């Protein structure tokens, strides 16, 4: 995976064999992604690379992450349960996603068309970060590590597969990741687990 956000816009995320080819989704949607990047940076967000994707931070909190697949590209919000979404533009990553968290674009000029809304939503999310506000705990849901949440937001296929797992299998990954001593170890484990999650297996299954 790439570790520099600039590499994503030039070559892609590095997760598949389409990396740095004309078939890479990040290159197919390059113009639209560049516009999203400009909007995020002009709102004063700090750009970094996490989970192979450009991630934008404020007040030491993840705010949004940018991603692309062949059919569309998207801006996904962290702590989506806080977002009010008065314009009704947020969508769920998939049928099992708990809260609508992304704005999906199917044309390069989508970010320009929705620029005012994007900026308003970014400012709303920044306000929550500055206030240290987080969504209330949902006792019916597993408390997923932040690193896993971010990885799911950045990878629609992984998100669909994870939310399709039984609660027991989901919990096996939560336990495993919570046992990691460093942030990098968590990230490495998530990357290593991707194939098992896609195959519908738990962390300890062969």
Image: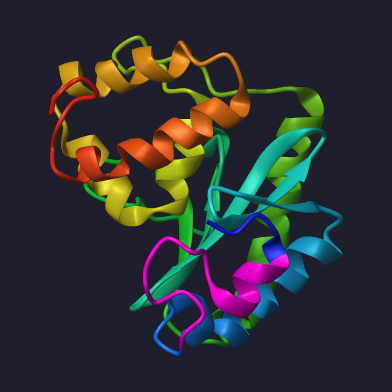
Q: In this rendered view, identify the residue nearer to me: 195 or 113.
A: 195
Q: In this rendered view, identify the residue nearer to me: 32 or 197.
A: 197
**Residue in view at x 14 percent, y 24 percent:** 205
Q: Using the rendered view, name the quadrant where residue 109 is placed.
A: bottom right
Q: Position of residue 83 (x, y in %)?
A: 56, 41
Is residue 8 visible in the rendered image? The answer is yes
Question: What secondary structure prevails in the magenta region?
Answer: loop
Instruction: Answer whether residue 13 is magenta in the image.
Output: yes
Q: In this rendered view, identify the residue nearer to me: 201 or 167.
A: 201
56 to the left or right of 152: right
**Residue in view at x 36 percent, y 39 percent:** 192
71 to the left or right of 103: left
Q: What stretch of residues is rendered in magenta?
A: 6-21
Q: Position of residue 149 (x, y in %)?
A: 46, 35
Looking at the image, is 152 positioned above or below residue 103? Answer: above
Q: Position of residue 8 (x, y in %)?
A: 61, 68
Q: Using the rendered view, name the quadrant where residue 53 is placed.
A: bottom right
């Amino acid at each position: 995976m790439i570790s520099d956000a600039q590499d994503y816009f030039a070559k892609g995320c590095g997760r598949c064999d389409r990396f740095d080819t004309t078939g890479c989704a990040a290159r197919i949607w390059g113009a639209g992604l560049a516009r999203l990047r400009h909007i995020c940076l002009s709102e004063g967000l700090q750009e970094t690379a996490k989970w192979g994707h450009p991630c934008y931070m404020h007040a030491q909190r993840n705010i949004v992450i940018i991603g692309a697949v062949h059919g569309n590209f998207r801006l996904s919000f962290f702590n989506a349960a806080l977002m009010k979404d008065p314009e009704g533009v947020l969508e769920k990553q998939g049928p099992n996603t708990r809260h609508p968290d992304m704005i999906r674009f199917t044309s390069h000029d989508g970010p320009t068309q929705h620029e005012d809304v994007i900026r308003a939503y970014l400012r709303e999310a920044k306000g929550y970060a500055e206030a240290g506000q987080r969504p209330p705990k949902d006792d019916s849901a597993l408390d997923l590590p932040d690193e896993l949440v971010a990885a799911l937001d950045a990878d629609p296929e992984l998100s669909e597969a994870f939310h399709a797992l039984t609660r027991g299998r989901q919990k096996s990954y939560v336990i495993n990741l919570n046992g990691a001593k460093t942030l990098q170890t968590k990230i490495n484990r998530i990357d290593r687990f991707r194939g098992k999650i896609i195959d519908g297996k738990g962390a300890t299954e062969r």
